[in-house]
Image (spheres, rainbow, N blue to C red):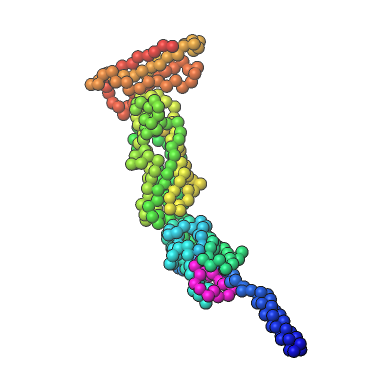
Amino acid sequence: MQKSTLLISSLCALAIMGVGLSSCKDDDDPVVPPKLSISTETVTVGEGGGNTTVELVLDRAAATDLTVEYDLGGTATSPADYTITGTEGEVTIPAGQLTASIQIAIVSDAIYEGDETIEVSITDVDNPDVVITNDDEAVVTITEDDQQISASFAAATITANEDDGEIVLGITLSGAAPQDITLKYALTGTAIDAVAGAAQNPPVPPQFWDYIIDVETDGELVIPQGSTSGEIVVTVFTDFQFEDDETIIVTLNEASNGVQISASNATTITVEQQNGKILALVWREEYTDVDMDLFLWDMGPDPDELLGMSITPGAESNVEAVIIPTIVGEGSFGACYTYW
């Protein structure tokens, strides 16, 4: 009886030990989670190359569909430079599969932009058991296939006269404009632009304006698609100021649609004093504490209209002068002066 009891106890002990050993064996062999990565870190495609792909890879298949989220960055923009087939920012790896591809369609345009990049980076996956590795980014480089077009002035310097009326500035493109090109320019120099003069506070009276740009939008020029040149028309005013030569400097500073501003981006117009009758007021040089201003008036059909006034060329000048341009023709004029 005692032998039977001992045998049963030993068998039970072995059975319990067997269960324990089996349990320890299962704990030593846990389930290994799938690892997710991007197969290639760099991809290069021409702008006219059509489509390219970025491939996502698992080292072992998952039992369920995986939804992978990703970010897009880089210098290229969607949809101007590329589009994503399917849902942008999201791709699915089917259950039992090891790969899925992000399909990228490259947009081919006629605008020079230089090489651009698309940066793809995995941000999340909807299964917490999947591990995103450090190989989670790819850079797609789109190589440029369009010609760089540059804009420049046809002439660096132009000499004109106040009574010439219009001065035409030619701008040339090195190739036909792929789309409408908007060129922006700045105006500087000693001559007074009518638009800038009117905008000052207080505004510059019209009789002191020297020129105006004959375009709808001051400071911009549009060269139509297919054209290789454009013009900026400067209208020079005949005035009654007896002046030194003045300058109008036009500088291109910005262009749209990938056009480059060349080194020949500025032209200087020298406007010479027109011919006419000069009316001068002169006093003795030794009167250094004396200053005067000379005024010219219209005494014709619209009397008492101020036509112009003298501009003192220097602090120590003893001369004030105005001019009646030949282009004005004959008429009745009056003059007066102030004494300081």
Judge by depth and name the residue closer to the eye, 125 or 291.
125
Left/right of residue 41 with respect to residue 2 in the rendered view: left
Q: How many marks?
A: 0
Left/right of residue 99 with respect to residue 4 in the rendered view: left
For residue 301, above or below residue 17: above
Residue at the far front in the pictured view = 1
Quadrant location of residue 322?
top left
Q: Is residue 52 visible?
A: no
Residue at the far left in the pictured view = 301
* Residue 98: % across, % down: 54, 75
Judge by depth and name the residue closer to the eye, 173 or 160.
173
Seen at 53% across and 70% down, the residue is 55
* Residue 134: % across, % down: 61, 64
Judge by depth and name the residue closer to the eye, 244 or 17.
17
For residue 123, above or below residue 212: below
* Residue 328: % across, % down: 30, 27
Residue at the far right in the pictured view = 3
Left/right of residue 219 with respect to residue 74 in the rendered view: left
* Residue 169: % across, % down: 40, 42
Seen at 45% across and 59% down, the residue is 78
Quadrant assignment for the C terminus: top left
Quadrant location of residue 283?
top left
Quadrant assignment for the N terminus: bottom right
User: Would you say residue 331 sits in the magenta stretch?
Assistant: no
Seen at 46% across and 15% down, the residue is 318
Seen at 39% across and 13% down, the residue is 338
Q: Is residue 1 visible?
A: yes
Q: Which residues are magenta?
A: 53-68
